[in-house]
Amino acid sequence: MTITTLLVANRGEIACRIFRTCRDLGITTVAVYSDADADALHVREADLAVRLPGAAPADTYLRGDLVVAAARAAGADAVHPGYGFLSENAAFAAAVQDAGLVWVGPPVKAIELMASKTRAKELMAGAGVPLLAPVDPATAGPDDVPLLLKAAAGGGGRGMRIVRELDALPGELLAAAAEAASAFGDGEVFAEPYVERGRHVEVQVMADAHDTVWALGTRDCSLQRRHQKVIEEAPAPGLDEALRTRLHEAAVAAARAVGYRGAGTVEFLVSAEGRPYFLEMNTRLQVEHPVTEAVFGLDLVALQLRVAEGEPLPATEPPQPSGHAVEARLYAEDPARDWQPQTGALLTLEVPEGPGLRLDTGYTGGDTIGVHYDPMIAKVIAHAPTRTEAVRLLARALERARIHGPVTNRDLLVRSLRHPDFAAARLDTGFYDRHLAELTGPGAGAGDPATAALAATLAEAVRGPEAVRGAEGGRGTAVAGPAPARFGAWRNVPSQPQRKRYRSEPDGTEHEVAYRTPRTGTPEPHETPGTRVLTATPDRVTLEVDGVTRHFTITTHADRVHVDATDASYTFTALPRFTDPATHTAPGSLLAPMPGTVVRLAEGLAAGVTVEAGQPLIWLEAMKMEHRILAPASGTLTALHAAPGHQVEVGALLAVVQEDPAATPVPVPVPEETA
């Protein structure tokens, strides 16, 4: 049967990726979407779209009956499940076929056989696939730990626990079972030995209904957080030819054992000694499939559609691989804060284009990253003749990307790719357990945030008070941000240094930048030796720093300032130039009500003297007038920070009076006020 109209039972990046192949093949595309995804990229890119009422996955993308009804309503003749959601649900696959639609996936029986990891392992043992010996938790002893508990159904790290102490086993079993039941509707959990420093290596298979099974090389997916993959590559580095052959043969044997058709992945754990053990078979397309496509020059989605139409694979043997490919998953998450997912408006998403680079994404600038789904923004893939070249290309592309909005793991990805262990292919699933602190700690990345803050300040100084600050949120919506603060008729003296404060995000480091705006009108740094301004516009600043020319692109969204340099990117929150006196809550604090010069103090004023409520203590000169600072209460002057001749900013702390109603005031002479 020839497929003419395909519904993708998924969302985001994978739906967009499948639509891309469909357009190349002349196939009409149908999207399904939840209310939260009404304006999502996959909906905008599809030829047709059908709403699934609700927002939560359980009410929308996991409702197989609604998806089948949507396919019928749109006139689709085939359904592709993508990955996740219903992609490995045998009942859904059967429902699609019962509705007279083509199922772009493996046979229902193959899904059923591989759905339970415990039953799959029994089947693989019979096919001669290498396995870890199972451990019965009820009889586990001290020699059996560490153990790995895993959910029998599903994946993605849910229901998975590492148990290093036997006393913790009962509690971890209960926790793993509860998580598995919640995630997959099946609380079955099994235990097996935990392999320290093991590598996650997998083999892509592609099979047709004409007895051809391809083993399309290996992938290494060892860099993981919470048992979910972060960086993947093909081929898996550092495997000798004998081990590669064994993995390929085991994967083909696994596929043949279940009568597999279509794209699937057989996953293995490879010990530090080079012994492989079967983990599971994913009966679907994998997130990391682009690295295999790059190395083999194939379109795996096109092959899936071809096999689903009943056609044979193009040849009995797969094409020869070429080069190396690496993929990084860009997530809206904060690795330094326990990988906490982030949400909000994705204001800008621009990844460099060029030979060997590929971007798979479900977002564009202006979209919103919501709370209902996985926080993956995009996958960035690089392909080059060698691993070193591919890694370098990918790291540089990520480094140069412009990503404005929620906190992402972009910096972590760049630092991971450049870490000595990764460069030397010393890979295992404990990489982030060992290195996360150094990869996310202060000073872990390249670049100079202080210089970036200076560039942001100079751009704002050029921009002026009437600048439009950019999109605060929502695609295509421009809003005016707050203009620089004004203080009545008071104005800065251009020859005097001005100051701007920023807070780095997400680490919270504060930066203060001083600059002058001379009569020439071009702002220049102050107190920054070795730095001079070459050009400065509202969105681009070029500085010479210690003889090296550096370029900065500046984008402002409300109070957030994004600075993209050639070696790093920075996000700052602009802080008030002058501290708001209302934010000071310390009782008895005397704050400068305006910028000015301290011209004199009350006679005898010093820490430790008593003062009377309403007594003038400090005189400021501003706008050619003197202003008195009065004691707020009767008591003791506990601190004095002002001195004649001091220049102070608005809100500066001048002195502190500790109220003491019982104190007997010592009169301080009060000079006459002068105009």
Image (cartoon, rainbow, N blue to C red):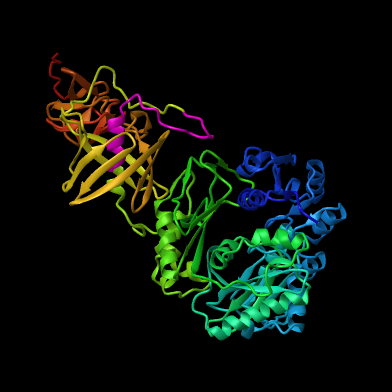
Q: Is residue 658 visible?
A: no
Q: Nearer the viewer, residue 637 or 106?
A: 106
- Confirm whether the magenta stretch covers residue 490: no
Q: Nearer the viewer, residue 311 or 188?
A: 311
Measured along the vertical axis of the image, is residue 26 above or below residue 561? below
Residue farthest to the front?
A: 315
- Confirm whether the magenta stretch covers residue 470: yes
Q: Residue at x 24, y 31 (%)?
A: 649
Measured along the vertical axis of the image, is residue 121 above or below residue 446? below
Residue span colored magenta: 454-478
List x then y, in percent, for residue 119: 78, 74
Q: Quadrant of residue 627?
A: top left
Residue farthest to the top?
A: 675
List x then y, in percent, for residue 481: 41, 28
Q: Quadrant of residue 49?
A: top right
Q: Is residue 419 visible?
A: yes
Image quarter hosting the N terminus: bottom right
List x then y, in percent, for residue 302: 67, 58
List x then y, in percent, for residue 322: 51, 70
